[in-house]
Amino acid sequence: MVKNIELVIPKLEEYSYEEKLEKDPNTMSYNAGYNVTYSGYHYDTGCIDFTVDKWKNVYDKRIKENRYFAYIKDIDINKYVGYANYQYDKEQNIYECGILIEYKYRGKGYSKDALKLLIREAYNNGIEYLYDTFEKDRENALKLFLDVGFEIYKEETWKKFNKDVSGIIVRIKTDNIIK
């Protein structure tokens, strides 16, 4: 199912939508249980505190560090349905990407088209590969990435709720989306 969507870089005052997504336990449940150290992370729900006092700093950091962050907008209903992003990981020397669809819009076909638009954006900005990491048992995520043209790059194990979980790293050569 093809959606009539676009990626929209939000204005600072529109960051309320990101705040809404990141405080919703249903939307953020995939993110729960990791031993991470960033401020505002809720281990039990995966939610992240993204209050208005943090917006300007994050907005400026995204511009300064050339991170790409955009809302996914359904043009037909004139609403945001999630967000897409990529950023450079200096430690691993890779560009990591992500798609987050608001819980109530999941299963409606937004992810695939948004991911294609994100890959095209990365390609247009000279990024050769995009990567993502997630648990192997997230079958819908794996199917999405493979359907778009990602390949399984590496398998790893990490901790979630203090238990070992099998994970995968997928990647795509961004010019694949153009072919």
Image (tube, grey):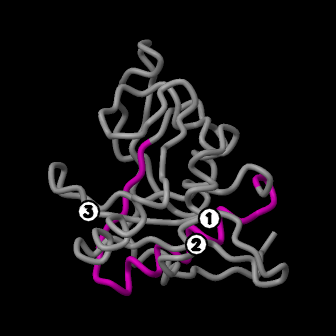
On the image, which quarter does residue 155 sit in?
top left
Badge 1: residue crowd in 10 Å (few <14, some 14–19, many ≥20): some
First of labels 2, 1 by sequence position: 1
Give the secondary structure at mark 3.
strand
Taking the magenta stretch, the answer to whether it contains residue 113 is yes
* x then y, percent, for residue 90: 16, 56
Question: In the rendered structure, are the residues bearing label 2 and label 1 in contact, judged by CB atoms less than 8 Å apart?
Answer: yes
Q: Is residue 167 left or right of residue 78?
A: left
Amino acid type at mark 3 = Tyr
First of labels 3, 1 by sequence position: 1
Q: Is residue 141 left or right of residue 48?
A: right
Q: Residue furthest top?
A: 163
**Which residue lies at the image location 37% right of the left edge and 56% below the top edge?**
131
Magenta part of the protein: which range? 106-133
Which residue lies under the disc numbered 2?
71
Looking at the picture, does residue 57 appear above or below residue 43? below
**Which residue lies at the image location 48% right of the left edge and 61% below the top edge?**
52
Give the secondary structure at mark 1.
helix
* Disc on res. 17: 1
Q: Residue furthest front?
A: 53
Amino acid type at mark 2 = Tyr
Disc number lying in front (3 or 1): 1
Which residue lies under the disc numbered 3?
88
